[in-house]
Image (tube, helix red, strand yellow):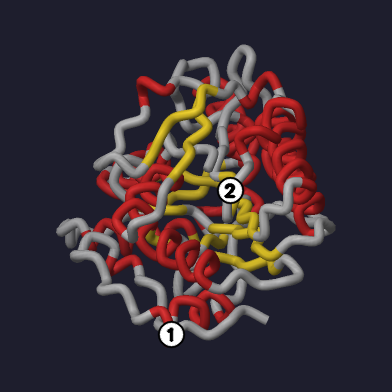
C-alpha cells in the first residue's frame, strides 16, 4: 500500500488492520507512519524518484493486493504530479501485474477523464488508463471532494462555511458531490473483498450533486450555525488572481491548479457506489454524526 501517511490512505490502513489484514506500507518517511498494532511494516520508498521493477519485484512476493492512495494537491520541490500521480504508480502497477498480484486498486479523483484540464487530473488519468489495460482485477476509484477529520480540504470548507458572507465565482454555482471518508473506506473495503475483473471505474460520491454554495450552507447547518450564508458573485479573474496569491503561501490548499478544479465542478451518478455500499452514502447533514455501521459484506452488490 502506498499513501498510508495521507488522509484517505491512513483511514483505509487503519480499517484494514482492524479487519486483520497485514500491510506493507511504502512510505517516504517511515517515522511518520503511526498505525495501531503490529500487523504492518513500513517500506522506505520515495515515489518521487519513480522506483522501478528492480525495486518493487522483491517486495511483491506473497502480496494479495496493491493499493495506491498517493496524491498531492500541490507540487513542491522534488514532488511533481507527473512522478507521483503517473510514472511511479504506473511502474508499480505494471510490476504487480508481472509478479502475479491478483488485485490492484487505484485511488484517483473525479474529473480524471477525457475532459481533464488540470495537471492534477491529467496525471491521475495516465495511471488510471494504465491500470484499466492490465490483466488484473481491481478498480479505479474516483472520489469527489472527501470530507473528514484530518483533511486539509475539509478544514478549508469548514472555515468557509463559518464566514458571515462569501464572494465566489459563479456565485458558488459550480457543482460538487462531497463524500465522507468513512464511505470512501467502506467502498474500498468492498472492492477488495470482491474485486471486479476487468478493472472497473467507480465514482465515489455523495447521494446528490450540490452547488458549492449549497454545500457550504448545508455544512454550516450541520456544524450548528443556523444563520444564513450570503454568497456574492465574484469575477472569475479576481478569484484566479487571489488563488495565485494564495499559492505563494506554503501549505495553502488553494492555488491556480485547485482553483481551476473547483471552477470545473465535480459530480457524477451515485448508483454504482450505492450498490457497492449496499446503502446510500452519507449526506452532508450526516457528515458530523457517528460513523454509519458497516453493512454485512454479502449485502453489497457487485459493480458491473
The disc at residue 134 is: none
In this rendering, would 170 be left or right of 294? right
Q: Which residue corresponds to mark 1?
A: 298
Residue 71 position in % (x across, y down): 57, 38
In this rendering, would 136 be left or right of 210? right
The disc at residue 62 is: 2
Q: Is residue 231 above or below residue 244?
A: below
Quarter residue 79 falls in: top right
N-terminal of the two: label 2 or label 1?
Answer: 2
Q: Secondary structure at mark 1?
A: helix
| Mark 1 neighbour density, 10 Å: few (under 14) some (14–19) many (20 or more) | few
User: Which residue is at 63% across, 45% downward?
Assistant: 261
User: Which residue is at 47% across, 82% downward?
Assistant: 300
Q: Nearer the viewer, residue 178 or 99?
A: 99
Residue 118 seen in the current view: no
User: Which residue is at 27% across, 71% downward?
Assistant: 292
The reply to whether dot 2 and dot 1 touch (C-beta < 8 Å) is no
| Mark 2 neighbour density, 10 Å: few (under 14) some (14–19) many (20 or more) | few
Q: Nearer the viewer, residue 10 or 247?
A: 10
Amino acid at each position: 500500500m502506498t499513501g498510508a501517511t495521507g488522509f484517505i490512505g491512513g483511514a483505509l490502513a487503519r480499517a484494514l488492520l482492524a479487519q486483520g489484514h497485514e500491510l506493507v506500507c511504502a512510505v517516504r518517511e517511515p517515522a511518520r507512519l503511526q498505525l495501531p498494532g503490529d500487523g504492518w511494516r513500513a517500506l522506505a520508498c520515495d515515489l518521487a524518484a519513480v522506483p522501478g521493477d528492480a525495486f518493487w519485484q522483491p517486495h511483491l512476493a506473497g502480496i494479495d493486493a496493491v493499493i495506491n492512495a498517493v496524491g498531492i494537491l500541490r507540487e513542491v520541490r522534488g514532488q511533481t504530479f507527473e512522478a507521483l500521480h503517473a510514472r511511479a504508480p504506473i511502474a508499480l502497477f505494471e510490476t504487480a501485474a508481472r509478479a502475479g498480484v491478483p488485485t490492484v486498486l487505484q485511488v484517483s479523483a473525479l474529473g480524471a477523464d477525457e475532459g481533464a484540464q488540470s495537471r492534477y487530473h491529467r496525471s491521475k488519468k495516465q495511471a488510471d488508463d494504465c491500470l484499466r489495460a492490465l490483466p488484473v482485477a481491481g478498480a479505479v476509484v474516483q472520489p469527489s471532494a472527501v470530507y473528514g477529520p484530518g483533511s486539509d480540504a475539509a478544514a478549508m470548507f469548514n472555515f468557509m462555511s463559518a464566514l458571515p458572507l462569501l464572494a465566489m465565482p459563479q456565485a458558488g454555482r459550480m457543482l460538487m458531490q462531497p463524500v465522507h471518508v468513512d464511505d470512501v473506506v467502506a467502498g474500498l473495503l468492498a472492492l477488495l473483498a470482491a474485486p471486479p475483473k476487468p478493472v472497473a471505474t467507480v465514482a465515489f460520491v455523495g447521494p446528490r450533486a450540490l452547488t458549492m454554495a449549497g454545500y457550504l450552507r448545508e455544512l454550516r447547518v450541520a456544524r450548528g450555525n443556523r444563520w444564513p450564508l450570503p454568497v456574492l458573485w465574484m469575477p472569475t479573474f479576481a478569484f484566479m488572481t487571489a488563488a495565485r496569491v494564495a499559492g505563494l503561501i506554503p501549505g495553502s490548499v488553494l492555488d491556480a491548479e485547485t482553483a481551476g478544479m473547483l471552477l470545473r465542478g465535480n459530480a457524477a451518478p451515485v448508483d454504482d457506489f450505492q450498490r457497492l455500499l449496499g446503502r446510500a452514502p452519507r449526506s452532508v447533514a450526516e457528515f458530523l454524526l457517528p460513523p454509519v455501521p458497516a453493512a454485512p459484506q454479502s449485502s453489497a452488490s457487485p459493480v458491473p
